Amino acid sequence: MSEGATVQAVLTERRGNVLLITLNRPEARNAVNAAVSTGLGDALHEAQHDPEVRAIVVTGAGQSFCAGADLKAISRRENIFHPEHAEWGFAGFVQHVVDKPVIAAVNGTALGGGTELALASDLVVAEERTTFGLPEVKRGLIAAAGGVFRIVEQLPRKVAMELVFTGEPMSSADALKWGLVNQVVPDGTVVDAALALAERITVNAPLAVWASKRVAAGIDDGVITADEAGWTRTMREMGTVLRSQDAREGPLAFAEKRQPVWQAK
């Protein structure tokens, strides 16, 4: 991956003690390919090791936050993970543990992988037009970037299970009602709102904030220990699902603009 491609796919900007990270593939609705995973992962790594960065805001360029994995890149058999740090997970983000508070500034569509980025963040500010959801089951897949086990932790169980089983979206208003997001703000204002929230954090003693996150998130030696079983279970189940006929039928039906015919095999 060339340096130019990495810089182009993910932009970073310092705002005082806050690092603003922008996914910058608006023509692809900020879908995650290797350039995004590399740029976002490296930005988080640099923020973690820079004592002047006390909080992080992640957003998307254009009208979408993140459309999930870049299916075109996957169809070309490209590796969409960070080439040197696959352990950081999808987008270089969902398994990348940092102790600086991370705020997702969700502008527009955040279905699938976009919702999983929000679930992996500490705080979420969303625009009114934003929709969240895990539609993977509609394609014969599961939300394997932490979505299935994290959503049942962050929503009331019955609400979460409805989203997981139906694959249907949730409005920003319902996301606020059920506590999936901290604030809903008018369209076009989410970055400013997230930066304002970040500034309410950065006025506090940084070491105390970071230590509080490690305790609250259950971080031991750079690992969220409570998530380990969820990741193991996800990888095992995803491996089985990916080998199924239904996993091939889902994307094919989508491409052919028809209803899938499921066989449960």
Image (cartoon, rainbow, N blue to C red):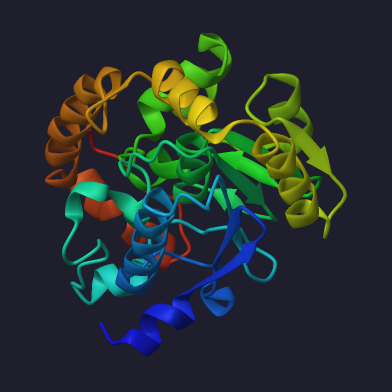
Front-lying residue, 98 or 152: 98
Front-lying residue, 264 or 111: 111
Farthest residue in the right direction?
Answer: 186
Residue 265 makes an appearance in the image: no
Q: Residue at left 26%, top 68%?
A: 74
The picture places residue 52, in percent across and down from the top left corner, at 52, 53
Q: Residue at left 44%, top 80%?
A: 7
Q: Residue at left 41%, top 17%?
A: 215
For the C terminus, the image quarter is top left
Left or right: where 36 falls relative to 206: left
For the N terminus, the image quarter is bottom left
Front-lying residue, 97 or 153: 97
The picture places residue 144, in percent across and down from the top left corner, at 30, 39
Residue 41 makes an appearance in the image: yes
Left or right: where 263 falls relative to 156: left
Left or right: where 223 falls relative to 7: left
Left or right: where 18 falls relative to 258: right
Q: Is residue 112 above or below residue 29?
A: above
Q: Is residue 256 above or below residue 152?
A: below
The picture places residue 248, in percent across and down from the top left corner, at 23, 54
Q: Residue at left 39%, top 38%?
A: 137
Front-lying residue, 51 or 164: 51
The picture places residue 35, in percent across and down from the top left corner, at 35, 74
**Numbered-mark total:** 0
